[in-house]
Amino acid sequence: MKQYFNIKKNFGFGCMRLPEVDGGIDTEECKKMFDKFLEEGFNYFDTAHGYLGGKSETTLRECLTSRHPRESYVLTDKLTEPYFNKREDIRPFFESQLLACGVDYFDFYLMHAQDKRIFEKFKRCQAYEEALELKKEGKIKHFGISFHDKAEVLDKILTEYPQVEVVQIQFNYVDYEDPSVESRKCYEVCVKHGKPVIVMEPVKGGSLVNLPEEAKKVFADLNGGSPASYAIRFAASFENVMMVLSGMGSMAMVEENTSYMKNFKPLDRRELEAIDKVRAIFRAQNLIPCTACRYCTDGCPKHILIPDLFACLNAMRAFKTWNAEYYYNIHTTGHGKASDCIGCGKCEKSCPQHLPIRALLKDVAREFEK
C-alpha cells in the first residue's frame, strides 16, 4: 500500500458501533479493544459527535486518548450539519469536540455527510473556510469531507474546494456499480482530483457479513477467510484507498480483522471471481440497500425504527425465515409500525442513500401487517 500522512496501516477503527452494557458503553471492553488494535500495529480511529448518542467522543477520551501518547494514534472527527446554523457556531462546537475527545488537535477533520443539500448549507455558513482557518492554527492537521451523493456532486465540491485533502465515501462490492450510491464513479472522481479515499461501510452495515446461504458457499469454497474479510480486502485492494474503516463492536471483530489486515494482500483473480458471484446473488435478492446509519429515525414524528424494519424485510427476502416476523414485532413494540407512516418525508431528506423510504415502508407493511 501507499503510505499516507502518518498512518501505519490501511485499516481503521470506526467508533460508531462500540460494545454496550447496561444501557451504556462498555468502557472496560473498549479499553481492551483499543489496546489490542494499537498492539497489532494499527493507529487510525474515526468518530463523530452524533455517534452513539454523543458517547463516542467521550469514550475515546476515557479509553484511548487519556491512556496513550498523542503521537501513538491518529484521530478523525467531523463537523455535522445539525450542530451549527452560522459560521460563528462552528468554532465553539469544534472546541467542545476537542474537549470531549481529550485532545489539542485532530489529525483529520471532515465536513460530514456531504450531499447537494448539506453542501449548500456548509457554503452559506462558510464552514469549509472556518475549518481551513482551524487548520492554519494547527488545530486540524488534515482537512477532508465524508460524502453521500452522486459523483457529479462530489466533482463539484472538489472543484470548488481543491484544499480538500481526503474524501471518505461509501464503498463496497455490492454498491460498486449501484446507481443510487455510485461507489465506482465517486472513487474515480477522487482519483481524477488526486484525493486519497477513506472507505466507510465496507461490509454495508453488516449485510456483507450475514450472507444468504448461497453466497456463503461461494466464499467457503475458497477454503479460507470470512465474508467480512473478503469485503474489507475488496475495498482495500484499490490503489487510491488509503484507509478502510470497520465499526467494530467486540474483541472478536478486532482480532479477526487485524489478523488479515496486518499483512494485507489484495484480492487475487480467484477471489475477485467469487466477489462477482456473490454480487450477482445479492442483485437477485431485491434487498433494500440500507446501511442502518439511523439518520432517518431522529425526526420521525411516529418514532418508526426505519432501519430495523428494513432489515426485517431484507431478512425475509434473503433468508425466508420465521424470525424476521418475530423481530418486526419486537421493533414495533413501543414504536411506530410501517403503516403508521404519515408520509411527511423528513426521513428521505436525511437519508444518505437517497432511498424512497415512504414507498419502502408500504412494502414493509404489506409483508408484515397482512
Image: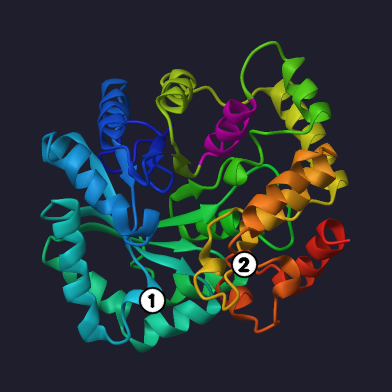
| Relative image position of residue 3 (x, y in whole percent) | 35, 36
State the residue in front, 235 or 30. 30
| Relative image position of residue 134 (x, y in whole percent) | 17, 69
Furthest toward the top, the residue is 223
State the residue in front, 235 or 17. 17
Looking at the image, residue 146 lies above or below residue 17: below
> Residue drawn at (64%, 13%), measured in percent from left and top?
224
Name the amino acid, label 2. Answer: Ile
Q: Judging from the image, what secondary structure is the residue with disc 1 in?
A: helix
Is 232 colored magenta in this rendering? yes
Q: Estimate how packed mark 2 is, as few (under 14), some (14 to 19) or many (20 or more) residues with alpha carbons within 10 Å.
A: many
Q: Hey, which quadrant is residue 11 in on the image?
A: top left
Taken as a whole, is the magenta stretch helix, strand or loop?
helix
Query: What's the distance in space between the residues labelled 1 and 2, CA to CA?
Result: 20 Å
Q: Residue 95, which numbered label? A: none
Q: Hey, which quadrant is residue 326 in on the image?
A: top right
Looking at the image, residue 184 lies above or below residue 270: below
> Residue drawn at (25%, 71%), measured in percent from left and top?
131
Residue ID for mark 1: 82
The answer to whether residue 154 is left or right of residue 7 is right
Q: Hey, which quadrant is residue 211 in on the image?
A: top right
> Residue drawn at (43%, 77%), measured in percent from left and top?
160
Q: Quadrant of the C terminus?
A: bottom right
| Relative image position of residue 234 (x, y in whole percent) | 61, 34
Name the amino acid, label 1. Answer: Pro
Magenta-drawn segment = 227-239
Looking at the image, is mark 1 or mark 2 nearer the viewer?
A: 2
Residue ID for mark 2: 304
Q: Estimate how packed mark 1 is, as few (under 14), some (14 to 19) or many (20 or more) residues with alpha carbons within 10 Å.
A: few
